[in-house]
Image (spheres, grey):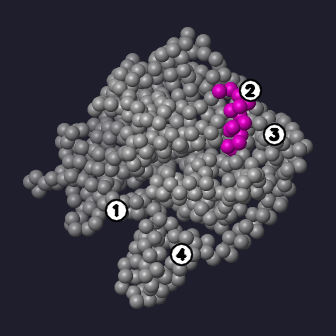
């Protein structure tokens, strides 16, 4: 996709977000881009926090106290349909405005003149009062312009004992990541970075499709690589695990500080994969010169803990620490299938559970299939049935329309409107809110998704039949409520700019909890049928959100927490919100259902799902995995029992998750498996 086409696609995504949430365009741009980059592991969770003044600007931030890292974001979103150029001077000016915000926030006079209700006040106050814990500041510039010249980033520098570093995501760089659906390449050149190649021991005969090496890598090398690439260095499931459980292991840190020479015998080291390596041999010794797309599949906590000691514990004897590394070189054509398996097996003897491998979980495929199959009822005044499009991977929606003719594209967009796209983090946000976990939702998209993964993993293991048509319809109804609340809050006269995300999740959770206390349930099936909310529901929803905002701001003040956003992440905030007393209007109460009726619906849906042989077959096919079906396909090529159409269906199963068999195809695949098992 060329830059003009990508800019148009990105602009459409931003417009849909702006229309759906009634946000300003640059706010929507920041959210859309940040979600893509967080998904790729390129940034931490993004917290919106717009502040613009003369020579000062910040659009969002992320605080990681473990790493002593503050990330500040500034946006340069340009109108129009043409790709504009950004000069180095404009880039420098953009960063300068964010730098100025940080510098001013370190002064009491600046902070005191800010409005206390403004979200940036909490951030500025945090910088002022807890700035000694911030050892690194990373500035991000997000723009839909294309940077001119060869300079793509500014060099890092020391400023008042802190390290300042800079990252720019211009249109060209965004296109490489978002437009292709692939993260930026990670290329580690040992000779260039560390002045020498890495000594290693080949652990294979060189003839297999996967090559293996054993090496001992200096801990400071590993820390510097992690500093350059951050969470992108971690395989996605390992990243999810660390977001749920925490990056730094105190025992590992203690060994580094107190017994560095014993780190090697005490620690299991790391397992990693790469797509390609450059190697050379001298005097019978093998050296790794360069590694392409390095991914740590086991030992993420070890890596993060080493990095933490490297950055935070000045004087730590990191140069005395060595780390054993097993490196598997997996060709790109089998990487999507093999790397998750290597990750799973590498972690099979430690604390990482199946729910931590959620990015490959069949739950996503089942929900995706339901979203493509189930048509939502037509809204008032329309005869068109539409779909709620579930994106189990970023970019699926864009890819679905990329190669369609104009006529087919119009048809697709009519049946699958952009306003009805739900991605993984959206789904997690809605489900966790209605589970009355607003403090988890307030952690941010990726951290909340990690919590959601644990919940779904356990629920799936208990009863995968619960994830049926009824579950999907309820989830969509929850999304309808959530998105409508976002819109209502934004236009409310009492809305305190910047706390919308927290206000909405707390407001909905408070309403759900109130209804539960009355032994009632929201009629989510009615909302699915009507694809919207009536006036009585909206009025009650807005009132609950008003009380939620009042409580989270007041609660932060009562508990001497200077940053409202950070207060909302605490369980104590939700505990206090549950104590807020309020009444429900009679018009709203009339729309509720008896709690037992909802449970009966669930039971009926579960029984129906068990009777759906197509759905059963579908889940069975997905659980078998593409590797299994490749074995069947090899056998089938020599079989006289199968028709050409069967081979086509097998090719689809072999290409999972890029291609997905239909439920009818899944039924035939189960029959083919029976033939295969009988013949073998």
Q: Is residue 162 magenta?
A: no
Q: Are marks 2 and 3 in contact (CB under 8 Å)?
A: no
Q: Residue at 46% of width from left, 54% of height from top?
A: 402
C-alpha span from label 4 to label 2: 54 Å
Q: Which residue is mark 1?
A: 333
x, y percent for residue 616: 61, 73
The residue carrying pointer 3 sits among few (fewer than 14), some (14 to 19) or many (20 or more) residues within 10 Å by Cα, namely: some
Q: Residue at 31% of width from left, 55% of height from top?
A: 275
Q: Which residue is mark 3?
A: 540
Q: Which residues are magenta?
A: 482-497
C-alpha span from label 2 to label 3: 15 Å
* Upstream in sequence: badge 3 or badge 1: 1
C-alpha span from label 1 to label 4: 24 Å
Q: Which residue is mark 2?
A: 494
Which of 240/591 is in front?
A: 591
* Upstream in sequence: badge 2 or badge 1: 1
* Upstream in sequence: badge 4 or badge 3: 3
Our reading of the magenta stretch's main secondary structure is helix
Q: Which circle, 4 or 3, is nearer the viewer?
A: 4
The quadrant in which the C terminus is found is bottom left
Residue at the limit of the structure toward the top, as seen here? 109
x, y percent for residue 184: 37, 45
Q: Which circle, 1 or 4, is nearer the viewer?
A: 4
């Amino acid at each position: 996709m060329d830059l003009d086409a990508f800019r148009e696609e990105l602009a459409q995504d931003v417009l849909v977000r702006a229309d759906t949430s009634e946000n300003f365009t640059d706010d929507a741009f920041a959210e859309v881009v940040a979600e893509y980059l967080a998904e790729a592991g390129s940034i931490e969770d993004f917290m919106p926090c717009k502040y613009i003044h003369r020579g000062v600007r910040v659009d969002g931030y992320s605080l990681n106290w473990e790493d002593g890292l503050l990330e500040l974001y500034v946006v340069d979103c340009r109108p129009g349909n043409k790709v504009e150029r950004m000069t180095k001077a404009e880039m420098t000016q953009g960063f300068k405005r964010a730098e100025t915000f940080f510098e001013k926030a370190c002064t009491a006079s600046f902070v005191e003149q800010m409005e206390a209700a403004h979200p940036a006040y909490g951030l500025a106050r945090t910088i002022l009062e807890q700035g000694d814990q911030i050892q690194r500041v990373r500035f991000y510039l997000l723009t839909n312009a294309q940077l001119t010249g060869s300079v793509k980033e500014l060099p890092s520098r020391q400023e008042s004992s802190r390290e300042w570093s800079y990252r720019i995501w211009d249109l060209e760089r965004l296109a490489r990541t978002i437009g292709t659906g692939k993260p930026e390449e990670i290329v580690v050149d040992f000779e260039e970075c560390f002045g020498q190649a890495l000594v290693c021991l080949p652990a294979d005969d060189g003839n297999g499709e996967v090559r293996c090496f054993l090496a001992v890598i200096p801990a400071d090398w590993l820390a510097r690589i992690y500093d350059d690439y951050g969470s992108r260095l971690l395989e996605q499931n390992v990243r999810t695990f660390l977001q749920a459980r925490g990056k730094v292991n105190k025992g590992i840190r203690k060994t580094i500080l107190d017994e560095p020479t014993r780190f090697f015998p005490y620690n299991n080291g790391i397992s990693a994969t790469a797509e390609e390596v450059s190697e050379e041999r001298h005097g019978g010794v093998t050296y790794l010169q360069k590694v392409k797309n390095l991914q740590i599949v086991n030992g993420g906590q070890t890596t993060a803990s080493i990095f933490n000691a490297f950055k935070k514990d000045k004087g730590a004897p990191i140069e005395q620490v060595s780390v054993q590394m097993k490196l598997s070189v997996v060709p790109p054509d089998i990487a999507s299938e093999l790397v998750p398996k290597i990750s799973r097996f590498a972690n099979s003897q430690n604390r990482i559970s199946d729910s931590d491998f959620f990015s490959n979980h069949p739950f996503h495929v089942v929900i995706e299939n339901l979203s493509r199959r189930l048509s939502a009822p037509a809204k008032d005044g329309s005869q068109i049935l539409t779909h709620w499009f579930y994106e189990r991977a970023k970019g699926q929606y864009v890819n679905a329309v990329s190669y369609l003719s104009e006529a087919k594209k119009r048809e697709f967009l009519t049946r699958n409107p952009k306003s009805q796209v739900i991605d993984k983090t959206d789904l997690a946000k809605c489900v966790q809110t209605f589970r009355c976990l607003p403090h988890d939702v307030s952690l941010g998209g990726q951290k909340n998704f990690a919590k959601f993964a644990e919940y779904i993993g356990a629920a799936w293991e208990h009863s995968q039949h619960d994830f049926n048509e009824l579950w999907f319809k309820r989830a969509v109804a929850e999304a309808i409520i959530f998105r409508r609340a976002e819109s209502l809050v934004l236009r409310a006269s009492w809305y305190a700019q910047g706390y919308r995300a927290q206000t909405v999740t707390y407001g909905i959770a408070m309403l759900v909890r109130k209804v539960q206390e009355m032994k009632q349930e929201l009629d989510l099936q009615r909302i699915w049928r009507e694809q919207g909310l009536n006036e009585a529901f909206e009025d009650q929803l807005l009132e609950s959100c008003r009380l939620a905002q009042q409580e989270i701001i007041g609660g932060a003040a009562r508990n001497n927490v200077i940053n409202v956003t950070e207060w909302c992440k605490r369980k104590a905030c939700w505990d206090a919100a549950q104590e807020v007393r309020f009444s429900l209007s009679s018009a709203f109460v009339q729309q509720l259902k008896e709690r037992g009726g909802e449970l009966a619906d669930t039971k009926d849906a579960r029984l129906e799902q068990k009777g759906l042989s197509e759905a059963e077959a579908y889940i069975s096919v997905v659980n078998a995995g593409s590797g299994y079906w490749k074995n069947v396909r090899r056998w089938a090529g020599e079989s006289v029992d199968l028709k050409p159409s069967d081979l086509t269906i097998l090719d689809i199963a072999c290409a999972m998750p890029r291609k997905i068999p239909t439920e009818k195809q899944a039924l035939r695949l189960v029959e083919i498996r029976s033939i295969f098992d009988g013949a073998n």
